[in-house]
Image (cartoon, rainbow, N blue to C red):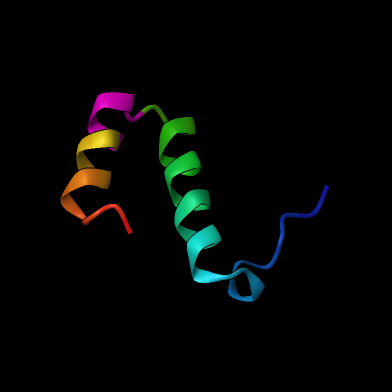
Amino acid sequence: MNLPDFKSLPSREQGRVGYILLWLIGVPIPILLLLYLLRGCT
C-alpha cells in the first residue's frame, strides 16, 4: 500500500493528515482539539 504524496495534497488536506497521524501515534483527542483551536480553526 502506497501512501499519498503529501506535497500533491491541498494544504487543507495536509493538515488533516497531520492530525490523523498525531492521533494514530497516541496524542489524546482533547490535546488535538486544543491545538486546532489555538491555530485559529483554519
**Residue 24 point in image, percent of width and height:** 49, 32
Can you tell which quarter of the image residue 3 is in? bottom right
What residue range appears in magenta? Answer: 27-32
Q: Residue furthest right?
A: 1
**Residue 26 point in image, percent of width and height:** 39, 27
**Residue 25 point in image, percent of width and height:** 44, 33
Q: Is residue 19 left or right of residue 17?
A: left
Q: Is residue 26 left or right of residue 20?
A: left
Q: Residue furthest front?
A: 41
The stretch drawn in magenta includes residue 29: yes
Please determine whether, in this image, residue 27 is positioned above or below residue 9: above
Q: Residue furthest left?
A: 38
- In which quadrant will I find the C terminus? bottom left
Taking the spot 83% from the left edge, 47% from the top edge, the residue there is 1
Q: Is residue 12 left or right of residue 31?
A: right
Taking the spot 23% from the left edge, 32% from the top edge, the residue there is 31
Instruction: Count up the numbered dots.
Output: 0
Please determine whether, in this image, residue 20 is positioned above or below residue 16: above
Q: Is residue 36 visible?
A: yes
| Towards the viewer: 1 or 10 | 10
**Residue 22 point in image, percent of width and height:** 41, 40
Q: Is residue 41 left or right of residue 1?
A: left
Taking the spot 43% from the left edge, 32% from the top edge, the residue there is 23
For the stretch drawn in magenta, the main secondary structure is helix
Taking the spot 49% from the left edge, 40% from the top edge, the residue there is 20
| Towards the viewer: 37 or 23 | 37
Can you tell which quarter of the image residue 40 is in? bottom left
Q: Is residue 28 visible?
A: no
